[in-house]
Image (cartoon, rainbow, N blue to C red):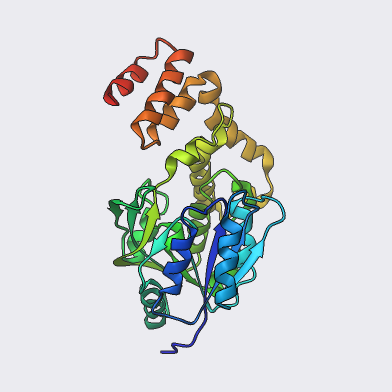
């Protein structure tokens, strides 16, 4: 086993001053030391930039990049992964943390299992304040992972995986169609697993901070696509299974528009559904109630909104 291979860690950052010191420190605390941490500040308006610079000046393994304008998580991730120098690549979101032996365990697993090209782990779920509020387990075997790729029970936390460099060289990065919509990591990993063998380690190595309310607040009433992007992504994946390519890859934007319209139509016919959907994916009861009240104002006779509202009391 060669313990000298470089591991690249990709970390986009935007307005992450509250958490980014913890994220960087957990990389500095890694038991595996031959790594580079590539961080790009995506034109933050808070103190994120200064915090990253402070750490980069102290440790040459931290490579700091600055976006002149805000280009979003997806494009920043693509920018960073494209300049990684490591034989292995892993990820850490700027508001998450991981175990001190995470890189060492993932690296050793890939070294000991040369047929596996992608490996993830179970994760802890944290509140915004860093308290553990739950866990998520993922299937370990490649066979179950492939079986679950298009099911509601997805097989990975996207940021928790480590890949061999050849995976990125073959598949590429996130597809820009998903820019600022979400689900880009699911789409990417589904495409990666169609080509390469993947597994998960039955250990809790990554801690994901649950900040879903901040995501849902960014969705506007007419922004249906963020609410249906999972359905669109799964239909694209099913197209690839049937024919080897999806309409996005083929540049068939007429077909793509048909898919989008199919899933957008219920929201266009009933705008209250936007708020009902937001309430369903929001963890905080107060925010959930506000969305349901909006839904009732738009459609006063939609009884299920009252039912869900009563459940939040």
Location of residue 120 (image quadrant): bottom left
Q: Estimate the x, y position of residue 103 in percent, counting from the top left.
A: 41, 74
Q: Could you tell me residue 34's position as x and y percent?
A: 49, 82
Q: Residue at x 61, y 59 (%)?
A: 49
Q: As drawn, is 14 to the left or to the right of 66? A: left
Q: In the depicted view, which residue is nearer to us: 150 or 298?
A: 298
Decide if residue 118 is in sight here.
no
Picture coordinates of residue 205, whole percent (x, y): 34, 66
In the rendered image, the residue lying farthest to the top is 301
> In which quadrant of the rendered image does the N terminus lie?
bottom left
**Residue 92 or residue 121, whichever sits in front:** 92
Toward the right, the furthest residue is: 68
Residue at x-position 64% and y-position 36%? 257
Q: Looking at the image, which is closer to me, 69 or 147?
A: 69
Q: Is residue 164 visible?
A: yes
Judged left or right of residue 135, residue 261 is: right
Residue 301 vertical position relative to residue 60 in the rendered view, above or below: above
Vertical relation: 66 (above or below) 273: below
- Is 311 on the left-hand or right-hand side of 9? left
Q: Is residue 102 above or below residue 146?
A: below
Q: Quadrant of residue 224?
A: top right
Where is residue 210 shown, x and y percent of the image? 39, 47
Vertical order, 159 against 61 (above or below): above
Quadrant of image for the C terminus? top left
> What residue is drawn where x is 36% and y is 37%?
283
> What is the number of callouts on the image?
0
Q: Tell me which corner region of the image, top left, top right, bottom left or bottom right, holds residue 113.
A: bottom left
């Amino acid at each position: 086993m060669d313990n000298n291979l470089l591991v690249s860690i990709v970390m986009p950052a935007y307005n992450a001053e509250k958490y980014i010191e913890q994220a960087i420190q957990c990389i500095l605390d890694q038991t595996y030391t031959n790594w580079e941490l590539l961080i790009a500040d995506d034109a933050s308006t808070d103190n994120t930039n200064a915090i990253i610079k402070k750490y980069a000046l102290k440790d040459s393994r931290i490579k700091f990049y600055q976006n002149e304008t805000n280009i979003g998580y997806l494009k920043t991730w693509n920018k960073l992964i494209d300049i990684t120098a490591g034989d292995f690549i892993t990820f850490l979101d700027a508001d998450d943390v991981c175990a001190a032996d995470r890189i060492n365990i993932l690296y050793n697993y890939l070294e000991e299992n040369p047929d596996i090209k992608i490996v993830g782990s179970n994760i802890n779920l944290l509140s915004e304040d860093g308290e553990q509020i739950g866990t998520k387990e993922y299937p370990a075997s490649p066979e179950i992972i492939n079986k679950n790729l298009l099911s509601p029970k997805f097989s990975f936390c996207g940021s928790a995986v480590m890949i061999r460099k050849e995976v990125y060289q073959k598949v590429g990065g996130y597809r820009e169609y998903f820019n600022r919509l979400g689900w880009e990591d699911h789409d990417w990993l589904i495409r990666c697993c169609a080509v390469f063998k993947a597994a998960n380690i039955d250990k809790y190595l990554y801690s994901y901070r649950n900040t879903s309310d901040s995501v849902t607040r960014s969705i506007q009433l007419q922004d249906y696509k963020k609410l249906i992007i999972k359905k669109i992504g799964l239909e694209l994946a099913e197209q690839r299974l049937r024919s080897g390519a999806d309409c996005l890859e083929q540049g068939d934007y007429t077909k793509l528009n048909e898919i989008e319209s199919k899933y957008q139509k219920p929201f266009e016919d009933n705008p209250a559904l936007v708020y009902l959907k937001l309430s369903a994916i929001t963890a905080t009861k107060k925010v959930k109630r506000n969305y349901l009240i909006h839904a009732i104002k738009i459609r006063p006779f939609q009884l299920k909104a009252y039912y869900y509202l009563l459940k939040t009391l």
